[in-house]
Amino acid sequence: MNAHYPVVATRAGHRCEYCRAPEAIFNFPFEVEHIVPTGSTGTSTDDNLALAGRSCNLFKADCREAVDPETGLTSPLFNPRVDDWTESFSVDRSRGTILGLTPKGRATIERLRMNTPSQLEARRQWARLGLFP
């Protein structure tokens, strides 16, 4: 397990810092990911680490920006250390959809593929169990 996991997971409330998936539902710990990849000047310090579910981490990869589907312009991705989640995203609980409120939010949703059919169904179930958002 990543040596930073205890600090990062506690700070994140054991939720993916991108899609807010509850770690408790999964049968393995979430991943500690570098917000700014180490290959792009990122460090392994607490201010550059986030807790991410496998799907979010896989699709984020080493990207730092993506295209906002509404404007067609490139935008930085959501940064959990400096951006407020509720300013960038909202949730339609009945559909399980994460909605982007800003270019950064919309670009992040697109890049991380946060609204696949399986994710929507999972979020609806988590909401019924009181585990999401």
Image (cartoon, rainbow, N blue to C red):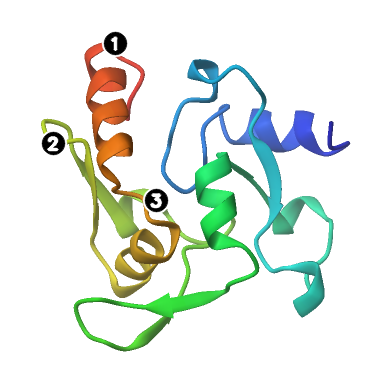
Looking at the rendered structure, the secondary structure element under dot 3 is helix
The mark that comes first in sequence, 2 or 3, is 3
The first of marks 1 and 3 along the sequence is: 3
Q: Quadrant of residue 73?
A: bottom left
Q: What type is the residue that disc 1 sits on?
A: Leu
Q: Which mark is residue 85?
A: 3
Determine whether 27 is above or below 98 in the image.
Answer: above
The quadrant of the image that shows the N terminus is top right
Q: Determine which of the numbered discs, if any, sits on residue 98 in the image.
A: none
- In the picture, the disc for residue 129 is 1
Tell me which numbered mark, 2 or 1, is placed earlier along the sequence: 2
Please state which of residues 62 and 132 is positioned toward the viewer in this rendering. 62
Q: Residue at x 31, y 20 (%)?
A: 126
User: x, y (%) of residue 132?
Assistant: 33, 25
- The picture places residue 60, in percent across and down from the top left corner, at 55, 61
Point out which mark residue 95 bears: 2
Q: What is the x, y in percent for residue 105?
A: 34, 63
Element on which disc 1 rests: loop
Measure the alpha-carbon separation of dots 1 and 3: 22 Å
Q: Are marks 2 and 1 in contact (CB under 8 Å)?
A: no
Query: Number of marks in the image?
Result: 3
| 106 to the left or right of 81 | left
Instruction: Residue type at mark 3: give it.
Output: Trp
Asked where in the image residue 95 lies, by quadrant, the reply is top left
